[in-house]
Image (cartoon, rainbow, N blue to C red):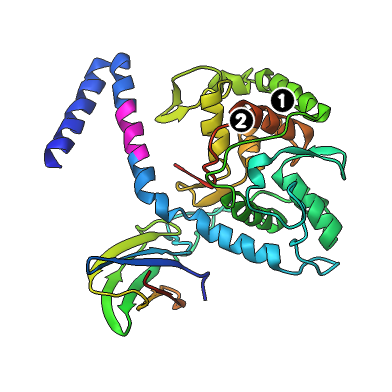
Amino acid sequence: MRHKNKFVLLASLLAVAGGVGSNVALADQSTDAIAKYREMIADGNPSELFAAQGEDLWKTKRGPKNASLEKCDLGLGAGVVKGASAKLPRFFKDTGKVQDLEIRLMTCMETLQGIDPKTVVNEQFLKGEREKMAALVAYIVTESNGDKINIDMKPAEMKKMYELGKMAFFYRSGPMDFACSTCHGDTDKRIRLQDLPDLRSHKGAAAGWGSWPAYRVSNGQFWTMQHRLNDCYRQQRTAEPIYGSDVTIALSVYLAATAKGGTVLTPGLKR
Amino acid sequence: MGNPMKIRAASKDGVTEVKVLISHEMETGQRKDSAGAVVPAWWIKELTAKHNDKIVLTSEIGSSVSKNPYLAFKFKGGAKGDKIVVTWVDNKGDTRTDEAAIA
């Protein structure tokens, strides 16, 4: 072990001395270390704590109608949670819309519990109803862990959303003229020491879409997909989308369709 | 009274491995909130694990440990069905105890 440490130190010194070219080697080592760390902590993913709260919430009677969410139809029939999130977003006939997990949950909260969706949409992330939403999401995505990403692209509405999502992915905006593709449209890119998946490719999209929602170790927060996408826009220094708006669903459809057949690793564990 | 812990314990060849996931803020007391006020320190200071009634681990931990910490340890002995009891006490005097059976 001691020898290995020496080697790492030596390699880092070389990398610094060698300048830009050798940084790649350093990055590889560091990302290896991150992968090792993930492996170590894999059976202690704190998402479990959020999932446990979410499971309670799913069964708790709440709202003006004093009902639980146990009759919520996530696409596989009323109350079926197992495997549901691997097949989301999907087109729902009852609402006539393409919905992702969070928007579908808002529909259920409105119809079953009588909770106004505005209480979620107008809230901040990690607070109030959104905090409850994150716990529910943690519970539901855990129940699809290991499944294959398999969204139904047959409905015309899904195809439309896919095209819109693709357009949004490459659409540059804001003072930095950034698009999603600026960082996620090339192979072997990284920001600081984080690998950036190429979300245009099946492999990259499966790695990205498949591992969110996730627990972030650095801030101890559980982030839903809506939260993740919102923060991507914030990082682009451009307008942040309204919670659950069409562009967020469209991007999710684009990512999930590109990732189709990949493995669901949710809830993920991130730096 | 904090949120529940997740405890898993498995016995193999006379050695029991215990894995505990703890739900706690673990505030260092060094951070400031958006208004500039110091966020008060709030961390677990003592953690004890028992196998049936026998203490197998005592630890003093503090502000350097992450939020929602994960703890894994092994001890000799322990059979299937035995009870593992984990208790923590934090610097505010709050305490939480959870238990699990060895699988």
* Amino acid of disc 1: Gly
Q: Residue at x 54, y 58 (%)?
A: B37
Q: Which residues are magenta?
A: A28-35
Q: Quadrant of the C terminus of chain A?
A: top left
Q: Residue B101: in sight, yes or no?
A: yes
* Apparent side of residue A50 relative to residue A161 in the rendered image (left or right): left
- In x, y percent, where is residue B11? 30, 67
Frontmost residue, A104 versus A151: A151
Residue pointed to by mark 1: A165
Mark 2, secondary structure of its residue? loop
Q: Which mark is residue A88?
A: none
Chain identity of mark 2: A
Residue beneath the point at 75% across and 51% down: A105
Residue at image mark 2: A260
Judged left or right of residue A26, residue A7 is: left
Looking at the rendered structure, the kind of residue marked 2 is Lys
Whether pointer 1 and pointer 2 mark residues with C-beta atoms closer than 8 Å, the reply is no
Mark 1 or mark 2, earlier in chain: 1
